[in-house]
Amino acid sequence: ALPISPTSHKPFPTCLDAAGQNCGMTSSDEDGRLVLHVRSGTSAPRHTPMQMNAQPVEFECDNFVGRCMLLHRPSWSYENAESQETYPWKQHFHGRKRLWEWRLQGKFKRRPGVLYCGVELEEYVPVNFATRTLMRGILPLIQGALQCKHVRHEIGRANDPSLRPVVVAPVWAADNTLVHDDPSAAPNLADTTLPSGFGRKAARQFWEEVWEGRGPSFEGPAGGPTFTFAVWGPAQLLDLRGWVFRKLPLMWGKNLSLEPFCGKQPVHAVIYELAGDEGTEVEHRQGQKTYAVDVRMMPEALWSSYTLGEAGPELPSVDPENPLMKRSNSSDSFCSALSESEFDNREDKRLIPQGSNLAEASLPEESGGLLSPSSQLPMPLVRPNGSDTDRRILSNFLMCCRRRRRGNFIFA
């Protein structure tokens, strides 16, 4: 892989392994191929390719040395139907709702500060009305899956690359945390099922002691204890193979593509600490972050175009069969949607010119406004002395509107 700066995640023209060969950076099967890289190295960081359902990949980040892996069941097994067909870690997944599980094991180089775990985007992009509305409904579901209300959502700013969009929670929100003073007692990360460690309540107490300077020692030649983390909290809602949300309330069984929320860019699974952390209202800026782990992921369908700098609205959607969410002209951000609650209440009032036919009237093209999903419908306009055809069209439209929630339609 090509070297990058510690806080940069820009795309690579190519990705090569240690032998200089094109890396096998996708899953080993054809069922939802996902590009995965883990950032490794400190003086000259680079991204090391990894695969789903493969052996753990060794890495070293700013304040952590260890290994990580991603387990993900095939899509045909999601409903846990009885089948003689097998797949990796079937004994672990079958009968459970989780679709995937992240595993991480290693040691901190020094005593860590307050740690945050979650996802990060590389660039801020705005979101439209529909996306913001959906995300305000999805966020409580994520909080419920994590059983944690201390979720930090940073929307970032359009012209401030040091403030990236993030959705993170304290590291004690991990589903399973194991701590071993003796490294030989730590479990094998590739075991079918890891032993149970701290739950969230016990993990929170442990980490708060560490952040207060108490708890285990991180000094000496042996360093601190060996940590093992397993995360699967949002896994029943989030299908990484399909790059979609699934089984959301009020979706009537339809999947919802991730692309309108995160744009055509990689999503980074991260754990980092924040220098001078003074509470939940502090902005999470890049210059203050010290990473323990940084894994970027992206569907293979978008990866080739992304690395060649071709990502944009003209590319096909990852989920083109999903009619519910369409991409706008800007890349919509998963994280940006979580905090933006101010709506544009401006009213557009338009009059149809005298002598023109309502059926042939067209609307001027919007310039970046946030519109409702129904904004593409004809604008209801009224002018005096309209023709019978105009009045008939308007009457039919008004009958339809009575059954719809009021959108950005203004009668002038």
Image (cartoon, helix red, strand yellow):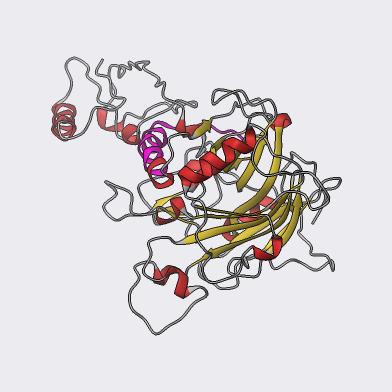
- Which one is nearer the viewer's eye here, 217 or 412? 217
Q: How many marks?
A: 0
Q: Is residue 201 visible?
A: yes
- Give x and y (percent) for residue 8: 74, 40
In the rendered image, which quarter contains the N terminus?
A: bottom right
Q: Is residue 154 magenta?
A: no
- Asked if 134 appears above or below 366 in the picture, the reply is below
Q: Residue at x 46, y 81 (%)?
A: 86
Q: Is residue 127 visible?
A: no
What residue range appears in magenta? 123-142
Residue displayed at 67% across by 48% down = 294
Instruction: Identify the residue shown where x is 22% and y is 17%.
Output: 383
Q: Position of residue 222 (x, y in %)?
A: 79, 53
Could you tell whether 385 is left or right of 205 in the image? left
In the picture, measured across the screen, residue 110 lies left or right of residue 163, that is: right
Q: Residue at x 29, y 47 (%)?
A: 249
Question: Which SS type dominates the magenta stretch?
Answer: helix
User: Measured from the top left, where is residue 292 in percent x and y?
Assistant: 69, 45
Where's residue 410, x and y in %? 27, 19
Q: Give the answer, above or below, for where 39 lies relative to 370.
A: below
Q: 170 and 86: which one is in front? A: 170
